[in-house]
Amino acid sequence: MNYWLMKSEPDVFSYDDLVEKGKAEWDGVRNHAAQNNMKAMKKGDLSIFYHSNIGVEAVGIMQIVEEAAPDSTDETGKWIAVHVGPKEKFEKPVTLKTMKADPALAEMVMIRQSRLSVSPLTEAEFKHIISLSKA
DNA sequence: GCCAACGTTGGC
DNA sequence: GCCAACGTTGGC
């Protein structure tokens, strides 16, 4: 089991949009590092859903339901996407400010490399963010 | 709206 | 293969 963090601008695609659809292709990722992370995803892996730009906070958990396959929005055939489904919406979102201030999350890839839209989390980081969402 | 970080492009 | 210019992302 691996853990991830994926970003989306909620005015484009929000956690509630995912809940409504039930399943969605995580398309449009055009960054090699992010692509490599998606290629490493296995069915059943869990990912934090993070709202960038608006909200700037982690809002819920989703599950990888289909592993990497060609991105349907890519005409070149070079890029891949995974399919995700909703797992659990946080009772309380965890803001970037909270995560940045927390020593337990100081090594988080997303904190250190803020522009990366798909990044790995350690199991400890994943669980810690969950615990913050319940506080 | 600004700006830092950083990826990509293109000239040499 | 280097590096300057430029575009995009994303926090503030």
Image: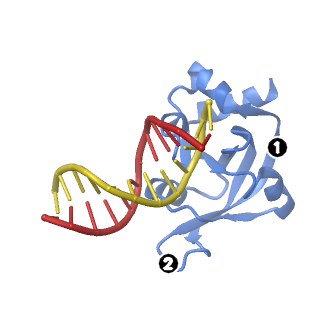
Chain colours: A blue, B red, C yellow
Circle 1/circle 2 CB separation < 8 Å:
no
| Front-lying residue, A61 or A93 | A93
* Location of residue B8 by image quarter: bottom left
Residue at 67% in and 48% down: A46
Could you say whether the residue bearing mark 1 is in a helix, strand or loop? strand
Residue at 50% in and 69% down: A79
Q: Which image quarter holds the C terminus of chain A? A: top right
Q: Which mark is residue A89?
A: 1
Residue at 69% in and 51% down: A9
| Amino acid type assigned to the residue bearing label 1 in the image | Lys
N-terminal label among 1 and 2: 2
**Above or below for C4 versus A94:** below
Q: Position of residue B1 (x, y in %)?
A: 59, 44
**Above or below for A3 versus A130:** below
| Amino acid type assigned to the residue bearing label 2 in the image | Gly
Q: Which mark is residue A77?
A: 2
Are tags 1 and 2 found on a single chain? yes
Residue at 62% in and 75% down: A72
Q: Is residue A134 left or right of residue A43?
A: right
Residue A100 appears in the picture as rendered: yes
Could you say whether the residue bearing mark 2 is in a helix, strand or loop? loop
**Above or below for A105 versus C3:** above
Q: Position of residue A122 (x, y in %)?
A: 56, 36
